[in-house]
Image (tube, rainbow, N blue to C red):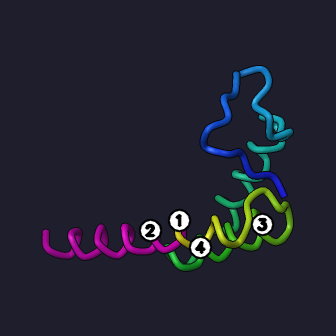
């Protein structure tokens, strides 16, 4: 499990999480390619890859952020319908 505490300082060359830029780029491209079905589908894909497969973030840290993503997407969708 890789979690960086909020009080830890990191630099560009030594981010402290052990994830290379190339690996992160490949994972996010995979999330983008597999994400279809709206925000709920994208959050599910992110959960599967980031929490279950890669163990980059814990379940307890992912879920509150996923709730925020889901709420923001819903509000944005509702606002777009009002136009």
Where, quadrant-wise, is the C terminus in this rendering? bottom left
Instruction: Estimate the spatial distance between the alpha carbons at disc 1 and disc 4, rounded to whole Å.
Output: 5 Å
Q: Which residue is mark 2?
A: 68
Whether residues under marks 1 and 4 lie with C-beta atoms below 8 angstroms apart, the answer is yes
Numbered disc 1: secondary structure: helix
Q: Which residue is mark 3?
A: 49
Considering only order in the chain, which callout, 4 or 3, is on the residue closer to the N terminus? 3
Region of the chain picked out in magenta, as a range: 65-83
Q: Residue furthest front?
A: 7
Horizontal placement of 21 versus 18: left or right? left
Picture quarter containing residue 50? bottom right
Picture quarter containing residue 70? bottom left
How packed mark 4 is, by other alpha carbons closer than 10 Å (few <14, some 14-19, many 20 or more), is: some
**Residue 23 appears at what percent x and percent y?**
83, 43
Whether residues under marks 3 and 1 lie with C-beta atoms below 8 angstroms apart, the answer is no
Picture quarter containing residue 31? bottom right
Instruction: Estimate the spatial distance between the alpha carbons at disc 3 and disc 1, rounded to whole Å.
Output: 15 Å
Whether residues under marks 1 and 2 lie with C-beta atoms below 8 angstroms apart, the answer is yes
Of residue 3 and residue 45, the one placed in the foreground of this image is: 3
Q: Nearer the viewer, mark 3 or mark 1?
A: 1
Q: Is residue 55 above or below residue 18?
A: below
Q: Is residue 75 above or below residue 31?
A: below
Of residue 49 and residue 60, the one placed in the foreground of this image is: 60
The mark tally for this picture is 4
């Amino acid at each position: 499990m890789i979690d960086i505490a909020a009080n830890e300082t990191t630099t560009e060359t030594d981010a402290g999480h052990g994830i290379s830029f190339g690996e992160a780029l490949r994972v996010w491209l995979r999330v983008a390619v597999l994400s279809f079905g709206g925000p709920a589908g994208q959050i599910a894909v992110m959960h599967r890859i980031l929490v279950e497969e890669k163990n980059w973030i814990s379940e307890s840290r992912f879920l509150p952020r996923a709730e925020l993503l889901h709420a923001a997407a819903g509000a944005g969708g509702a606002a777009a319908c009002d136009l």
